[in-house]
Image (tube, grey):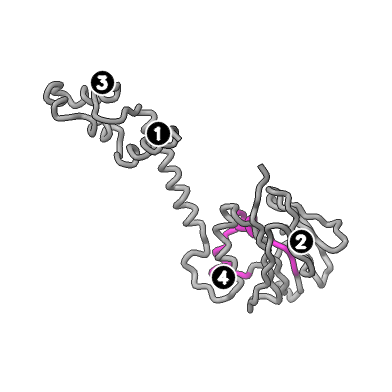
Amino acid sequence: MEQEEGLTAVDNIVTQFNTYEDFLDSQITTVDLYYLEDESLARQLVELGYRGTGEIMKREDFEARKAAIEIARQAERTQKKTLTSAGKILQDNFLKALAVREEDNLSGKVSSIIFIRDKNSHGQEISGYIDYAHRLKMQNFEVYFSGKKKLLPRATDLSFYNWDSHIAVCNSSPNYQVITDNPDGLLFKYKRDRKILNVDPKVQPGDNSTRISIQTDLYMQAVIFDHISRRKT
């Protein structure tokens, strides 16, 4: 508790003053300047703890905390900028559903698997399961949210099946392990909490998981599975 209060006091000082010199100047009184007749000397005495009206803080502590706060602010600004759905006027329910989940998937609060069944550019019916968080980090979704391209499963996703050529591919991702030896169909094990997500529509998806069928004009079929992580400690 005392450590937290000390850190809060440091943060208050760091955010109040732009530079360490500004902080030192705030500790110098008019009486100090009258007797010392040298602002630089007065600053040195405050820094050493011989003069001052408040908290004593070393220069390296001030500058280190100042840098840490600025890094945190930049990270927050970057996180907000990376939401490619921000500011987009989305008409279709599928894109709206992806936009709602974008930030939580990037932060790791939620991990979504997207099932899509549709036709590719050659008119072939394809389907597959997409690790949304992984795709977000590997690809710029601006083209999808802006309507320039259509999100479709690839042979590099969790699963991909071409119904015309009968090509079937499965790949584990940084978030999910694909389990293919289940007689009732694919299973996905979330690597953080090792929970199993079952995509079979006839059964429940599993612990901390939900299944939502999306009514969309963009695809023949679209389903989103959301898993809320409960990482084991």
The residue closer to the viewer here, 141 or 190, is 190
Answer with mark 2 or mark 3, whichever residue precedes in sequence.
Answer: 3
Q: Amino acid at mark 3?
A: Tyr
Magenta residues span: 127-150
Answer with mark 4 or mark 3, whichever residue precedes in sequence.
Answer: 3
Q: Which corner quadrant of the image does residue 109 belong to?
A: bottom right
Q: Is residue 35 above or below residue 62?
A: above
Q: Which residue: 74% across, 62% down? A: 205
Which dot, 1 or 4, sits closer to the camera?
1
The residue closer to the viewer here, 53 or 138, is 53
Which dot, 2 or 1, sits closer to the camera?
1
Q: Label 3: which residue?
A: 50
Residue 197 seen in the figure: yes
Residue at disc 4, secondary structure: helix
Separation of residues labelled 1 and 3 (CA atoms): 21 Å
Residue 58 shown left or right of residue 137 in the figure: left
Q: Point out the residue furthest to the bottom here.
A: 217
Q: Label 1: which residue?
A: 6
Q: Point out the residue furthest to the front here.
A: 1
- Residue 96 marker: 4
Separation of residues labelled 1 and 4 (CA atoms): 44 Å
